[in-house]
Image: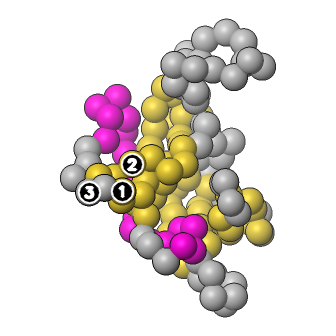
Amino acid sequence: LWRSDRDWRVDGFTLGDIDNDGAEELTVSLWKTGSFGTLKPFWHEGEDVSYKNHLFVFRLREDALRPAWCSSDLPRPIVTFSIMDADGDGLNELVTEEGAYRRVAGERYEVDTNKPTGMAVWQWEEWGFYREEGE
């Protein structure tokens, strides 16, 4: 049904109704090079070569999983995540444990296991996530 790009390192996934539309989506935490693909926004200068963490959401459409929303590299890498109604309002949220980056070599990063992590709660709003609460 679906296979990730071979240049990605998927480190977590979950099924759940992340956007509260009544259908489950596949939400994936992955590591890859670059934020923009082949088309970069006009404000971005230089090469897009950093290897960092991203969050992608896929929807089942016409018997195939298709990208619905794909983040640029995240400011704080995801260590763990889940989809749940965290605040009891009847809507699902994305609950993340977030860490810090550690430069490995050049523009390649990984989670710094020597730094503390923090929890964050994110709500889907039309086209992306906004932070409800967190450290």
Whole-angstrom CA distance, mark 1 to mark 2, is 7 Å
What kind of element bears circle 2?
strand
Residue 68 percent coordinates (x, y): 50, 51
Question: What residue is pinned by disc 1?
Answer: 61
Residues at marks 1 and 2 touching, judged by CB atoms closer than 8 Å:
yes
Rendered image quadrant of residue 18: bottom right
What amino acid does circle 2 point to? Arg
Tell me if mark 2 has few (under 14), some (14-19) or many (20+) residues whose alpha carbon lies within 10 angstroms of its own.
some
What amino acid does circle 3 point to? Asp
Whole-angstrom CA distance, mark 2 to mark 3, is 9 Å
In the image, the segment drawn in magenta is 4-21
Which residue is rendered at x = 49% and y = 77% of the image? 22
Question: What residue is pinned by disc 3?
Answer: 63
Residue 92 percent coordinates (x, y): 59, 77
> Which of the two discs, 1 and 2, sits closer to the camera?
1
Give whichever of 80, 13 is nearer the camera.
13
Question: What residue is pinned by disc 2?
Answer: 66
- Name the quadrant of the C terminus: bottom right
Residue 10 lies in the magenta-colored region: yes
